[in-house]
Image: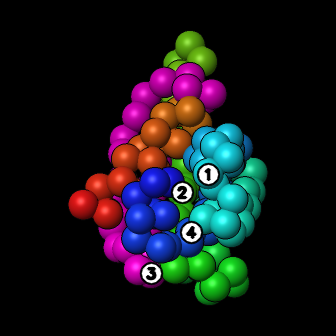
Amino acid sequence: LDALRARDLTISVAESGTAARFGSFLLAEPAASGLVLDITSSALEREPPSAITLAESSRKRTGSDAGVGVVLTILPVELGLYDGVVEVAVTGALESVASFPIRAAFIEIQRRSAMHAADLLRRSML
């Protein structure tokens, strides 16, 4: 958030299947006020939109400088584990896209999705 403030940038976040973990992570900081314009989240979807689509629609809807989209897709494998892919996109004033494969329990995949999103946003500002 400090890096966003230093660049005088605002962001909005749209997530699918992540239980708004990244948005919650950002909003847990008082410094988010005025920087994070909106957080939206939808339940896990069989055919979710792309992270780029979510990021762009969120950015355009709110007028933020950058949009962040986070999409989780999973398949059950065994013993309560899932194979998943976390797709993260940052669009607008900052640009970056990445996918992260993961195998873990569902709640752990959601938690890590927030860490991947935070890392990609940070790297997009370097």
The answer to whether residue 85 is visible is no
Foreground: disc 1 or disc 2? 1
Q: Nearer the viewer, residue 17 or 56?
A: 56
Q: Name the residue rendered at 64%, 43% in the picture.
A: 29
* Between discs 4 and 3, the one toward the N terminus: 4
Callout 1: few (<14), some (14-19), or many (20+) C-alpha neighbours within 10 Å? few
Q: Of the two numbered discs 4 and 1 on the same chain, state the one appearing first in sequence.
A: 4
The magenta-colored residue range is 84-108
Q: Which mark is residue 70?
A: 2
Could you say whether the residue bearing mark 1 is in a helix, strand or loop? helix
Q: Indicate yes or no whether the magenta region holds residue 16.
A: no
Q: What's the residue type where badge 3 is placed?
A: Gly
Is residue 3 among the parts visible in the rendering?
Answer: yes
Q: Amino acid at mark 2?
A: Val
Report the amino acid beneath label 1: Ala
The image position of residue 85, as x and y in percent, is: 44, 46
Assign a secondary structure to mark 3.
Answer: strand
Instruction: Tell me the CA gap for discs 3 and 2.
Output: 15 Å
Question: How busy is the neighbourhood of tag 3: few (under 14 within 10 Å), some, or many (20 plus)?
Answer: some
- Residue tagged by mark 3? 92
Q: Secondary structure at mark 4?
A: strand
Element type at mark 2: strand
Q: Nearer the viewer, mark 3 or mark 1?
A: 1
Main SS type for the magenta part? strand
- Residue at mark 1 to residue at mark 2: CA–CA distance: 21 Å
Residue 55, given in percent of the width and then of the height, sits at 54, 72
Do labels 2 and 4 touch, CB within 8 Å?
no
Mark 1 — residue?
31
Disc number lying in front (3 or 2): 3
Please report whichever mark, 3 or 1, sits nearer to the chain's N-terminal start.
1
- Residue drawn at x 37%, y 47% as measured from the top left: 119
Nearer the observer: mark 4 or 1; the answer is 1
